[in-house]
Image (cartoon, grey):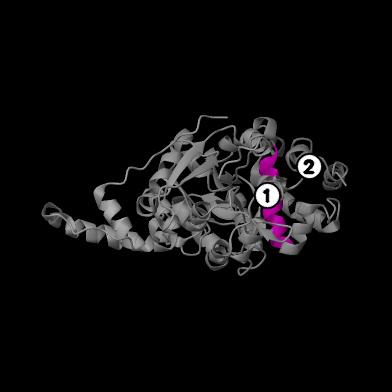
Amino acid sequence: MSTLRRRVVALGATAVAASLVLAGCASSEPAAEETASETTDSTTSDTCAAYEAYLGNEGTEVEMYTTIIDPEASLFIESLAEFEECTGITINWNGTQEFEAQIPVRVEGGTAPDMAIFPQPGLLAKFAGNGLVPANDATSASVDENYTADWKVYGTVDGTFYGTPLGANVKSFVWYSPKTFADNGWAIPTTWEELLALSDTIAAAGDVQPWCVGFGSGDATGWVGTDWMEDLMLRFQDAATYDQWVSGELPFNDPKVAEVLAEAGKILKNPAYVGDVASIATTTFQEGGAGLVDGSCAMHRQASFIGGILAADYGATIVSPEDTTTEGGITTFYFPGVSADNKPALGGGEFVGIFADRPEVHAVHHYLTTPDWNNKKAALGGWFSANLGLDTANVADPVNKVAVEILQNASTFRFDGSDVMPAEVGAGSFWKEMTAWVAEDKSDAAVLEAIYSTWPY
């Protein structure tokens, strides 16, 4: 376990005075030399008034255990500085890359952290009934008010709500060059059929390849194919069917799953769209989007994070959809559904669970669900959430801005299915068989039957 990174917030005279006023504590008459600071004290008091609900916990400490380390950790710490100053609660940020291995050790050893940020809901669920403390009523009500209902479901285990949403990512994106689209007069498709028709138009012109795709990812090769399946399951089947599929209630060889794989094949196994189909398996997911930058392909379906990789590794410039002049500029449009009003979203996110039933811990837990904190954090850059109170004006990155709009307007949100499925399937046979599907031209029926045979019924 990494050494606890302690942060002790030293409250200055101004902050102390403000805290005493807000707490209703008695104080002596100010000395003459303090008069000059009255304006500053008043300003601080006004700022801290927003934290009145969290007072009464001065001098307490809360450990936050997480996978998030610097440089991202520094931004989280900065976003909580005002909360700490005004409430007197010190948050000790303990970031470690050994989180997944160490959190069970700490819980079982009786040294569980006060709070933990879980990178996926499945891991949080393992601690329900084993140390996790349910969110209190105020925190639960805040999540009801500030998130769509789907997000609360992922933090609920056996009817008890534990994990509050934190950051998010969106996978339902198609990346493209606005300049290339504008130069060719291509319109953004709003339905699956329009997307296929656009692909036909691009293929017929013969100037660029309609799609660039890469499944390669070392030991995790194939996960890109599972993302395609998951996005299309949400579009061609309903949310309840998606949930049954992810849980194993709907078998992998069911006709509904076969329908979805066939739809995926209309793009991924069409040489007119993707070129050499077999090469998809050996093209890394990073390289998969490079053709957008050099202009050799028109579209690339990938999550919100790929923009940073394409910028760093291939010189892409992330632009807004309105920027139709920047060479090499790329951005995103929503991966369309069966109809224009069918707008499900596939993605992921972190959840905060608590292991200590103390008022200061509940206070921090609640604060992280509020629009106030979410807007402070987003304004620092490089982060967004599904909080309905998040103002996109605080989200500078144009793609993250679109991601927030997708999350706030999605008819349905679901987590990456392979991350929720049993590991031997989600991170095993599902990856492997989607790779064989393109690399070996393995049939749809054989792929689905092979995955079905590995499910731990």
Is residue 404 visible in the rendered image? The answer is yes
- The earlier-in-sequence mark between 2 and 1 is 1
Tell me residue 26's x, y (percent). Answer: 29, 61
Residue 107 occupies which quadrant of the picture? top right
Amino acid type at mark 1: Trp
Give residue 102's mark.
none
Pick the residue in front: 362 or 442. 362
> Which quadrant, please, contains the N terminus?
top right
Amino acid type at mark 2: Val
**Would you say residue 224 sits in the magenta stretch?**
yes
Stretch in magenta: 222-237
Residue 190 occupies which quadrant of the picture? bottom right
Q: Residues within 10 Å of mark 1 (few under 14, many from 20)?
A: many
Q: Residue at x 63, y 46 (%)?
A: 120
Instruction: Look at the numbered disc 2 and give the secondary structure of its residue.
Output: helix
How far, Cα to Cα, is label 2 from label 1? Answer: 16 Å
Is the Cβ of the residue at disc 2 closer than 8 Å to that at disc 1?
no
Q: Residue at x 82, y 52 (%)?
A: 248
Q: Which residue is mark 1?
A: 228
Q: Which-is-in-front pick, marks 2 and 1?
A: 2
- Residue at the far left: name it: 32
Q: Please tell me how many numbered marks the rendered image carries.
A: 2
Pick the residue in front: 37 or 70. 37
Q: Is residue 280 above or below residue 448?
A: above
Pick the residue in front: 401 or 208. 401
Tell me residue 398's x, y (percent). Answer: 43, 53
Q: Residues within 10 Å of mark 2 (few under 14, many from 20)?
A: many
Q: Is residue 113 above or below residue 41?
A: above
Q: Residue at x 65, y 68 (%)?
A: 339
Q: Is residue 380 above or below residue 315?
A: below
Tell me residue 318's x, y (percent). Answer: 43, 47
Q: Which residue is mark 2?
A: 425
